[in-house]
Image (spheres, grey):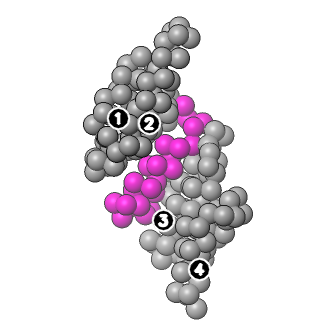
């Protein structure tokens, strides 16, 4: 694998990300796949999964995240994404171990996301004190994270 090929793969990945941000999901999928053909990276698999998710292809999104984890088990994003997709499917119990792995991953930014999603999973299981703790942990990491702040406030109103 030449450094040049890796560099090309990253350039194509950036174009794919741009297409995704502009809502051109078909083009993004095409570009992520080109990037993966040049040089497979955990990032390209994860972002391809994210694009599939936007297209409503949740099972395929989860499969891409699992490929990302095979390539780089230290990359936290795919663990968090799998957890978030499982929450959307109402599979709260299944989401928890993935999100816990995300909170422990060595390579992961932004770190508050998996704590917030873990809170969402516990909320789905009606385990309110666990959910509250997770939302608080998200806010300790990122005090300006409004979704966690709103979730915590809403949960406090609900249990009081």
Give the labeled residue for mark 2.
17
Image location of residue 62, percent across then percent down = 37, 44
In the image, what residue occupies the spot 56% across and 87% down?
A: 157
Residue 28 is marked as 1
Across and down, in percent, residue 81 comes to 46, 49
Q: CA distance from mark 4 to mark 2?
A: 34 Å
The x, y position of residue 151, in whole percent, is: 54, 73
Could you tell me if residue 40 is visible in this image?
A: no
Q: State the residue at coordinates (31%, 29%).
A: 30
Structural crowding at the residue carrying mark 2, measured as other residues with C-alpha within 10 Å and reported as few (<14), some (14–19) or many (≥20): many
Q: Is there a contact, CB below 8 Å, between mark 1 and mark 2?
A: yes
For the residues marked 1 and 4, what is the alpha-carbon distance in whole angstroms?
A: 37 Å
Q: Which residue is mark 3?
A: 121
Q: Which tag is nearer the camera, tag 4 or tag 2? A: 2
Residue at label 4?
Answer: 153
Crowding at dot 3, Cα within 10 Å, few <14 / some 14-19 / many 20+, comes out as many
């Amino acid at each position: 694998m030449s450094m040049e090929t890796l560099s090309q793969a990253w350039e194509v990945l950036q174009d794919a990300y741009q297409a995704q941000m502009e809502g051109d999901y078909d083009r993004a999928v095409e570009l992520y796949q080109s990037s993966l053909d040049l040089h497979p990276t955990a990032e390209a698999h994860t972002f391809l999964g994210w694009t599939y998710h936007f297209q409503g292809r949740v099972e395929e999104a989860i499969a891409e995240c699992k490929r990302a984890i095979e390539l780089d088990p230290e990359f936290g994003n795919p663990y968090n994404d799998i957890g978030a997709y499982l929450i959307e499917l109402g599979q709260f119990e299944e989401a928890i171990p993935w999100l816990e792995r995300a909170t422990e991953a060595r390579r992961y930014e932004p770190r508050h996301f998996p704590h917030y999603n873990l809170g969402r999973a516990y909320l789905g299981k009606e385990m309110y004190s666990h959910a509250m703790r997770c939302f608080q942990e998200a806010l300790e990491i990122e005090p300006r994270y409004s979704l966690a702040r709103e979730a915590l406030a809403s949960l406090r109103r609900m249990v009081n």
